[in-house]
Image (spheres, coloured by chain):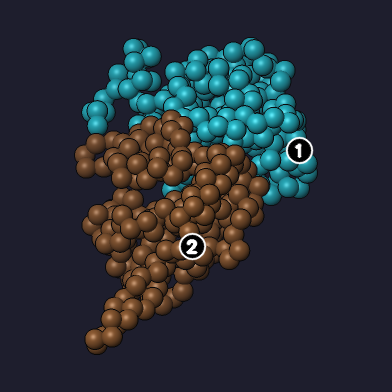
Amino acid sequence: MPNAPFVGKTATLRPFEVDDVKALREYLNHPDLMGRRHIPWGFPEFLPLIEPQVHGILERWATEERSVVLAIDAHIERQAWGLSGETSQVSELVGHAEFTWGWDPHAPSVSVVIDPEHQRKGYGTEALFLLLQHLFAFTPAHNVSCWIADWNDSALAFAASNGFQAAGRMRRVGLYQGHSYDLIITDILRPEFLQRSAERAASAQEEG
Amino acid sequence: MPLEGQLVTLREQKRDDLPFLMSLQNEPQTQAWSLALPPDYTDIMYEKRYEAREFSYDPDEARFVIVHKESGELVGQIQYTSLERRWSATMGIITATKFWGTGVALDAQEVLLLFLFCELGLRVVRIFTHSGIPRAGRLAEKSGFQVSGRMRQAIIKYGGLHDNMVMDLLREEYFARHPELADALPAL
């Protein structure tokens, strides 16, 4: 179980700050994220966001009850200037991660959004693991679900690779590119996560 | 305007209904979601809930009292929530145990579905229930709902773990079951 909550090897989860608005707006408006950026209800899911709207999103994230949204900071190695060849580690906002439990902390849901410019580097997997670790270590969560649009193949593969199992769908939740689409429901149970967590720790021990 | 079925009428809530509606909420057998609705509603709490409803041109829910036509007795409540205009809504029903097995719940459900599909023009109606109350799932299936999602062990009820079930009914499925109705909306 975690020593420092929300701190992983490649990424850290932290609260959003007002200073994050510019970077947040930049990745939320990335065309590849349209329809899958997991912003609060009432904000346009398929339209570019103006700065006051991004402030509004931060405000909602900060004040919504029964929901926590955290910034994902990637730990990025940067080459120093000059000939020394030294590198330094910087933190860069690359996405956001959310868990929400509605009226029942027994069955919360999670979502992870990564800036398309930083995808396929392991940050999403790390962020999801940190979220689940928190939920199972500090809350009575038993079933954690993740709801994904049926057209979002990369997210479906991401959920499956992180141990989430198919639990059916919610049919016809909206329109996407002229067609109605479903939400695929996936879930993971506490014993399943603990098993994966133990395997991950054993594997890290072998490697390290 | 009341919505008329064969056995029941659906009408708006009235202040006089509140003690009956409160008793439904406080009856463990008629509560599907034990954690969300602890059985200790007081008169004042229920009245506040009733009074908290404000006028809106853009309501996203409606609650109807189910009245038994023959006897005039109150049967229960049926409502829709989470309305997305011209798209979807979630339905819920609660009836007094006295009326279980009499067909009035199914009649109320059909009356509300007719309203949702033909007047509100919805494309899909959903019901959330769980495997701990098979009676609710069977009632929904009688109107054509199908279980489309099932989250394992996500509900605690009667001391056990039950699956949370998403049930839904698409517009074309509804009209296929009702050949007496014509659907003028073009398919998506």
Query: What residue is rendered at 53% in x and 14% in y?
Result: B6
Q: Residues within 10 Å of mark 2 (few under 14, many from 20)?
A: some
- In the picture, the disc for residue B160 is none
Quadrant of the rendered image containing residue B186? top left
Q: Amino acid at mark 1?
A: Pro
Residue placed most toward the observer, A161 or B157: A161
Is A70 left, or right, of A157 in this rendering? Answer: right
Q: CA distance from mark 1 to mark 2?
A: 43 Å
Locate the C terminus of chain B by quadrant.
Answer: top left
Instruction: From the top left corner, tell me how far across and down residue B35 is, in percent.
Output: 68, 40
Instruction: From the top left corner, tell me how far across and down residue B1 is, in percent.
Output: 50, 31
Residue B117 seen by the camera:
yes
Quadrant of the rendered image containing residue B94? top right
Residue at the disc numbered 2: A8
Residue furthest toward the bottom?
A82
Residue placed most toward the observer, A6 or A38: A6
Q: Amino acid at mark 2?
A: Gly
Callout 2: SS: loop
Instruction: From the top left corner, tell me how far across and down residue B81 is, in percent.
Output: 51, 39
Task: Note whether A159 is above or below A119 in the view shown.
Answer: above
Chain that the image shows in cyan: B
Residue at the disc numbered 1: B39
Instruction: From the top left corner, tell me how far across and down residue B83 is, in percent.
Output: 44, 41
Query: What residue is rendered at 56% in x and 27% in y?
Result: B10
Q: Residues within 10 Å of mark 1 (few under 14, many from 20)?
A: some
Chain that the image shows in brown: A
Residue A70 seen by the camera:
no
Query: What residue is rendered at 38% in x and 14% in y?
Result: B177
Query: What residue is rendered at 59% in x and 42% in y?
Result: A190
